[in-house]
Image: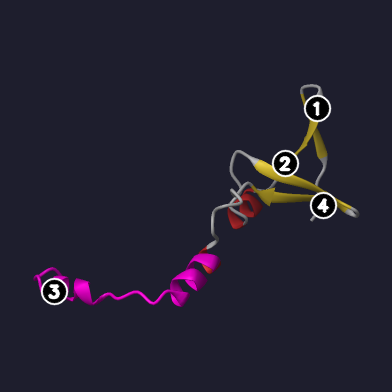
Amino acid sequence: MHAKLITIGNSKGVRLPKKMIEKYHLHDSLDLEEKEDGILIKADIPENKLTWEETYREMATEKEDWTDLDPLAGDGIE
């Protein structure tokens, strides 16, 4: 994809298409990382926050006992 720099006051900015913003879950704040071959733009996700994939993986490794929730299954709520 090609983009142009636009003037914003005394600075320059890049306008990102709405579809790209939605696809990569970008919000008000972004992480910019300088690479040897350019600039990487990433969603600003706290480092200590697990991704959905990591969350599922963590949950799969847990050996939790859910038998104490069995009585709730018969309480008439469907």
Q: Measure how far apart labels 1 and 3 are at the Cα level.
A: 62 Å
Q: Which residue is mark 2?
A: 15
Question: Label 4 amino acid?
Answer: His
Is the residue marked by circle 1 packed among few (<14), some (14-19), or many (20+) residues within 10 Å? few
Label 4 with label 3: CB-CB less than 8 Å? no
Sequence-first tag of 4 and 1: 4
Q: Which residues are magenta?
A: 54-78
Q: Is residue 75 left or right of residue 63?
A: left
Work out whether residue 15 or residue 57 is closer to the camera in this orientation and state it: 57
The residue closer to the viewer here, 51 or 24, is: 51
Question: First in sequence: mark 3 or mark 2?
Answer: 2
As measured in the structure, the alpha-carbon distance from the residue carrying label 4 to the one carrying label 3 is: 58 Å
Q: Position of residue 47 (x, y in %)?
A: 61, 51
How crowded pointer 4 is (Cα within 10 Å; few <14, some 14-19, many 20+) is rated as few
Q: Nearer the viewer, mark 1 or mark 3?
A: 3
* Label drawn at residue 11: 1
The mark lying in front, picked from 3 and 2, is: 3
Q: Residue at x 47, y 76 (%)?
A: 61
For the stretch drawn in magenta, the main secondary structure is helix
- In this rendered view, identify the residue nearer to me: 61 or 20: 61
Would you say the residues marked 1 and 3 are in contact, meaning their CB atoms lie under 8 Å apart? no
Q: Residue at x 90, y 53 (%)?
A: 36
Disc 4 vs disc 1: which is toward the camera?
1
Relative placement, left or right, of 70 versus 62 is left
Q: Which residue is mark 4?
A: 2
The residue identified by callout 3 is 71
**x then y, percent, for residue 29:** 63, 39
